[in-house]
């Protein structure tokens, strides 16, 4: 059978896609590239079998389980999940929440309450909401769009770096999650393909030059900002985050 797979369509998944292509495992998969919120929606509505999805999905799908040793995580600064503002954090009155995100929105809510101890008005967003960030209205932006906005605002708050400062733990944004039992042999093959991709990041970048036009140094970003291995510390950080999300 062909498993249906939804993968986040950001620069940070290039090594995973490369690994699947080089192992020829992509021939056994029906792969769609989506923004994180759509990845989650597809997995929750059974449109796909496996997704690289925001980890909040683990609380929303009855039979959700992680099938891989790899993730999209960060141990400190990540560069691509940031709160942008013209004013300091204590002067922010409202924040646009990124419509492409689920986990990052929950992370922001936790940090607003526990770390900054402020309660600005939280606003839903649509495409091009970034243009409405001004004055006392800030905005959460995630993914590759951050590269276009890094130098447009006076204040940039990297949520992963602040989570690390707040908890001492790394953060996991997305995991490979299935909504049903997945063949064990396939899981092993899948993990091997992902491992090949993250151990050949330079080659992966060269295979996808059209994807990262706004990132000045993709090699540094993928090697030093994104952390792919779902190790014990990341699992601790993930479990703490899911407890804090509640529900």
Image (cartoon, rainbow, N blue to C red):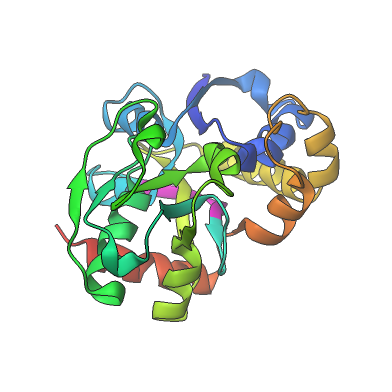
* Residue 233: in magenta span: no
> Residue, x 76% and y 54% (percent of image)?
220
> Residue, x 62% and y 43% (percent of image)?
12
Give the percent coordinates (x, y) of residue 71. Answer: 54, 52
Most foreground residue, 48 or 241: 241
Q: Which quadrant holds residue 116?
A: bottom left
Give the magenta-colored segment's residue range. Answer: 65-72
36 lies above or below 71: above
Give the percent coordinates (x, y) of residue 44. Answer: 28, 32
Most foreground residue, 214 or 225: 214
Left/right placement of residue 140 relative to residue 142 reads left
Give the percent coordinates (x, y) of residue 11. Answer: 64, 38
Q: Which quadrant holds residue 216?
A: top right
> Residue, x 54% and y 57% (percent of image)?
73
**How many numbered badges does the structure rendering display?**
0
109 lies above or below 130: below
104 lies above or below 115: above
Left/right placement of residue 3 relative to residue 225 reads left
Q: Give the quadrant of the C terminus.
A: bottom left
Q: Which quadrant holds residue 38?
A: top left
Q: Give the main secondary structure of the magenta stretch.
A: strand
Q: Extreme front residue here?
A: 135
Give the percent coordinates (x, y) of residue 239. Answer: 35, 67
> Residue, x 70% and y 52% (percent of image)?
221
4 lies above or below 245: above
């Amino acid at each position: 059978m062909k498993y249906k797979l939804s993968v986040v369509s950001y620069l940070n998944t290039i090594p995973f896609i490369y690994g699947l292509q080089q192992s020829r495992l992509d021939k056994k998969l029906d792969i769609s590239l989506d923004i994180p919120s759509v990845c989650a929606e597809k997995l929750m509505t059974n449109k796909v079998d496996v997704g690289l999805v925001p980890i909040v999905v683990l609380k929303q799908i009855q039979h959700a389980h992680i099938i891989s040793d790899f993730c999209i995580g960060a141990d400190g600064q990540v560069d691509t999940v940031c709160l942008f503002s013209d004013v300091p954090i204590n002067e922010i009155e409202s924040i646009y929440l990124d419509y492409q995100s689920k986990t990052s929105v929950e992370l922001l809510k936790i940090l607003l309450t526990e770390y900054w101890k402020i309660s600005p008005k939280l606003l839903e967003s649509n495409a091009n909401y970034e243009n409405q960030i001004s004055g006392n209205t800030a905005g959460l932006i995630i993914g590759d769009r951050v590269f276009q906005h890094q130098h447009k605002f006076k204040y940039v708050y990297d949520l992963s770096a602040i989570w690390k400062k707040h908890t001492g733990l790394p953060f996991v944004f997305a995991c490979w999650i299935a909504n049903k039992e997945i063949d064990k042999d396939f899981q092993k093959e899948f993990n091997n393909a992902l491992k090949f991709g993250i151990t050949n990041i330079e080659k992966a970048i060269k295979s996808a030059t059209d994807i990262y036009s706004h990132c000045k140094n993709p090699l540094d970003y993928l090697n030093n900002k994104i952390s792919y291995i779902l190790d014990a510390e990341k699992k601790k950080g993930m479990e703490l985050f899911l407890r804090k999300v509640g529900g």
